[in-house]
Amino acid sequence: MSPPKKPKTSGFLSWYFRVNLLKRILTGLVLGAVCGCVLGAFPQAAALFVDNARIFGDLFIRLLKMIVVPVILFSLVTGAASISPSQLGRVGLKTLLYYFATSVISVAIALALANLLRPGQNMGIAGDAAVKGTEAHAPPLSQILLEIVPTNPAESLARGDVLPIIFFALVFGIALAVVRDSKDGKVAAAADRLFELCSICAETMYKVVGGIMQYAPVGVFVLIAVVFAQQGPKAVGSLLFVTLTVYVSLAVHLVVGYGGMLRVISKLSFVKFVKGAYAASLTAFVTRSSNGTLPVTMRVCEDKMGVPRSVSSFTLPVGATINMDGTAIYLAVCAMFIGFATGQPLTLNQQLTVMITATLASVGTAGVPGAGAIMLLMVLESIDLPVTAGSSVAAAYAMILGIDSLLDMGRTCMNVTGDMAGAVIVSKSERVLDEGKWSSAVIPGP
Ligand code: ASP
C-alpha cells in the first residue's frame, strides 16, 4: 500500500499544500493551543468561538467516521486473504502464533502501565453537548464475546458494530484465501480477482484517508482550540504524559517481551539483536511505514542476523501486513487516555474489549503512516466511547491526533522490530538461523 501522494501544488491553496502535512498538523496543534489559551482568558469570546467554529471541527470528525467501516472491512479481508493456506506449513503456523502472542502481550503491558500511570486523569474534558459515551456501561464479558458473532453482517455494517464487522471480515478473508488456493483453476482465478478488488478498495479507502488528512490541520486547530479554551495550558502536560506512557510501554515490550523471548526461547543475546536490527528500526522510526521499510527489514534480517530467505520471505511481508505490536500498544494506551481524560475511566470489561479490538485492529492496520489513528476510532467505538461531533471523546481524540506523528514514529519502529524478532525466533526454532552472524562479539553494522 503506497502512502498518499502529495496533491497538486498549483492554484489558490497551493501555499497550503506545499507545506509538509506533518508540519501543517503540528502547526494546527500549536496555533490551536495558543488561540485556545488566549480565548480562555476571555470567556465571552471563547463561547462565541466555540459556537461558530465548532462546525469545522465537527466536519473533520464526520469525515473520519465516514471511512472507518470500509477501511476495517477491506483492509481486514485483504490482510486475512493474503496468507495463502499452502504457505501455512510449520513455519507459517509458528509465525502466526508468535505474532498473535506478542500482540496480546503488548496490549497487556500497555494496559497495565496505563492503569499505573493513568494518563489524562483529572483533565475533565467536557463536550459541548451531552456525550453519548458518558452514560455508557459495558455489558458483561460473556455477552461481548457472544456478540462478536454477527447474526446479520449487513446489519452490523449498517450500524457500524465494530467487533462483528471484524469477525465477519476475518472469516470472509480466511475463506477467500482458501478459495484462492483451489485446485480448480477457474475458481482460483475468480477468487484472485475478488481479492484484487478488495485490495484495490482498501487502497482506494487509504487514498480517501489521505484526502481527509489534508483537512486535518484545520480540524485539529479548531478541536484543540476548544480544548485549550476550556482546559488552559495544563492540557500540554497531559499530552506529554500520554506520549511518555506510550514510549515507556514500547520500551518495556521491547526489553521484556522481545528480549525475554529471544533469551528464553532462542538463547540469543538481546543486545546483539538490537545492534543488528537498528538500521531497520531506525528506518521505520523516520519513515513511519512498515511497508516502506520492508526492503531494509529483509536485508537486515538476512545479512546481519542470519535469517534464511526461506523464512524471511514469508515472515517479514506477512509481519509488515498483520503484526503491529507498536500499534496495539498505542491503541490501548490512547483508549485508556481518552477514558481518563473524559472522566470515564475504562472498566475491566471495557479493558478486556480493548484487548480484543486492539489486537485485531493491529492486524487490520495498514503499514503506512497514520493508519493506526483511524483504527483508534474503531477501538473507541467498541467500548462505547464513540467519537461523535461535539463530544468530549472527540476533543480528546483530536488531542491524540495532533501528536500522532510523534506516536507513529515509536509504534512503527516497534512494529518492524517485532517482525524481525519473530523472523529470528522462528528461524532459530527451525534450526536454520545462521548463528555464525551472532557469534562475533558484535553483529556487524550496516
Ligand atoms: N505507521 C504504522 C506502520 O506503518 C501503522 C500505524 O499507523 O500504526 O507500521
Image: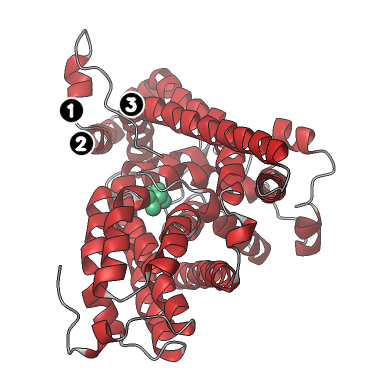
Residue at 54% x, 49% y is: 364
The amino acid marked with disc number 3 is: Gln
- Residue 291 image offset from top left, x and y in percent: 37, 49
Task: Say which mark, if any, is on residue 214.
Answer: 3
- Residue 303 image offset from top left, x and y in percent: 25, 70
The amino acid marked with disc number 2 is: Lys
Who is closer to the viewer here, 202 or 64?
202
Who is closer to the viewer here, 366 or 305?
305
- Find numbered disc 3 in the image and state the secondary structure of the residue it sits on: helix
- Binning the other alpha carbons within 10 Å of mark 2 as few (below 14), some (14 to 19) or many (20 upward) gives few
Residue at 16% x, 77% y is: 444
Measure how far apart labels 3 and 1 are at the Cα level.
11 Å
Measure how far apart labels 3 and 2 are at the Cα level.
12 Å
- Binning the other alpha carbons within 10 Å of mark 3 as few (below 14), some (14 to 19) or many (20 upward) gives some
The amino acid marked with disc number 1 is: Val
Q: Is residue 287 visible?
A: yes
In contact (CB < 8 Å): disc 1 and disc 2: yes
